[in-house]
Amino acid sequence: MRWLPFLLVPALIAQDQSGAKYYALKQINTGNVASLKQAWVYHTKEPLVPARRGGRKPALEVTPLFLHETLYISTPHGRVIALDPEAAREKWVYDAKINRDAAYGDFANRGLAYAAGKLYLATIDARLICLDAATGQPCAGFQIVDLTKGLRIPPTEAGEYQETSPPVVVRGVVVVGSSIADNGRTNMPSGEVRAFDAITGALRWTWQPLDDPKTGGANAWSLISADENNVYVPTGSASPDYYGGMRPGDNLYANSVIALDAATGRRIWHFQTVHHDLWDYDVASQPTLFTRLGAKAVAVGSKTGHIFLLDRATGKPIFPVEERPVPKSDAEGEQPSATQPFPTRPRPLVPHHLNADEAWGPTEADRAACESILKGLRSEGIFTPPSEKGTLVYPGNIGGLAWGGMAWDPENNLLFAPANRLAAAVRLIKQANFKTARANSPNWETTEQAGTRFAMQRQIIVGPSGLPCTPPPWATLSAIDTVTGQLRWQVPLGAMNDNPMLGAPHLGGPIVTSGGLLFIGATMDAYMRAFHVFTGAELWRAKLPTGARATPMTFQTASGKQYVVIAAGGHDNPFSPAGDSIVAFRLP
């Protein structure tokens, strides 16, 4: 069995920052997982309403930490809760008292970082806080950091600059990215990655993804990965997403993974997955660190549905990547990249073309309505630029790989990746018509993109039934052989309307165990599932209070019991309403 160097014993697995999501536990295995039962449910009892009108509802997306016989969870409201792992009894609670007078665009918290007896919390209102893991008291000598200060382009109002993902701790520093609203204007807050001293909170270094003084974004809103020496940073698009006439060129370091020296912030290498992004094709998933034939590597997933396998020392692709011609823009002032990178292996996990005659619907009338919608859009395959006519973007902004990322099985050299198959319609609106278009299109997301020629509207393409117009399955789970780069298997993920062939859109990630199992919640149909790592066969599922827009984890207590735990916070829609549950399972 090959082990990651920082996955030495089960007690340390909860601290893994590699993005591998591998747990060397096998009490629960392929032979007994069908007997897995709910052990307990813990409710955070936090309000499920936006902090301020105009913002989103809070989303419980935490992956808990298990350390020293304690389960730690963090919440979107800035609370950290230490629980007895077998009884869900509160040991202590810390409340950061977040600013509630802000319209947070992504009101979430995905977890904590841990090092040397300390917990590190990055709050939704952009503060970095250190807590004593034993008591929940603030760390002596650590100055709470206001992360909105010291930016190249600061936010103009509360809620524009957020922290939704946990920091990483390596070589004595705490490294953080940021979550930034994308489409309001060209000069949204800047996306610096920064490192702070783990003892004092003093700034150690700053890395800038962009040097244009008028362009914001390119921020690392997803989870950053780390090994013994470096951090691996996934970045999103430069602002705004859907028109780039004011940010010419490739916008290097946006839509990329960047390896930085953790001690100094020096850039070691970068790999860009999308040039001059016009589609919101962020590197949304955490880079996954793994080993291949004895060499260190990293897997990078994108909303495009591409997975790039790279040498971790150099950033060079393990399998060839081709620069292929892509469609041109017909929007005034736009100059998209003439080519985009396509990996030759693995193959894309989602389709890149959708013809109108492929439209789907539960009835013929619904299918015909979907076909009419698709016929009215510009559609020349992936990377067709946004247009005033309206463009079919497939995969859309929540298509492909989402923030839940991938999991890697070091025993079998398999990489597991969930992916959405959803198309979006995007249209550009002349600025003079922005207010009218917004008023006349209440079902579209409409943003100004101030500082450019065009505002933007987008929506997931659904038919009269409310179901997607794209052919199912709408989500899949895939296994990729990291030695050959070939797809080992692919199965639908989830079951809308109790139909497993439809799949169900998801937001959240998988974990894999040495018991031969892959666990994942994530889907809108509100189930937790276990799959066989060799075949993709579903071996177990359990109904959750609501959907789990989160990544699960597993641990084994001193009493010898293995638990699987997931946050069921919902997807905030009729299929999966908002919730406040942490749910644990174990064998009888």
Image (cartoon, helix red, strand yellow):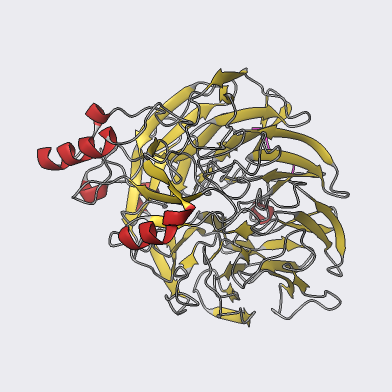
Look at 71% across and 52% down and name the residue there: 214
Main structural element of the magenta stretch: helix, strand or loop? loop
**Is 3 contained in the magenta span?**
yes
Q: Is residue 580 visible?
A: yes
Residue 147 point in image, percent of width and height: 73, 67
Quarter of the rendering containing residue 66? bottom right
Q: Position of residue 102 (x, y in %)?
A: 56, 75
Residue 139 locus on image (x, y percent): 79, 76
Segment tinted magenta in the rendering: 1-5
Look at the image and tell me whether residue 471 can be seen.
no
| Left/right of residue 106 with respect to residue 528 in the rendered view | right
Relative to 181, residue 96 above or below: below
**Residue 47 position within the rendered picture, expressed as x and y whole percent measured from the top left:** 44, 79
| Residue under the point 37% across and 50% down | 459
Answer left or right for 108 relative to 154.
Answer: left
Quarter of the figure with the N terminus: top right
Specify whether residue 358 is painted magenta.
no
Along the viewing direction, whichever of 287 and 56 lies nearer the viewer: 56
Q: Give the residue at the far left of this rendering.
A: 364
In the image, residue 575 sits, relative to residue 481, either above or below, namely: below
> Relative to 86, is 310 above or below?
above
Name the residue at 83% across, 78% down.
Answer: 140
Number of numbered discs: 0
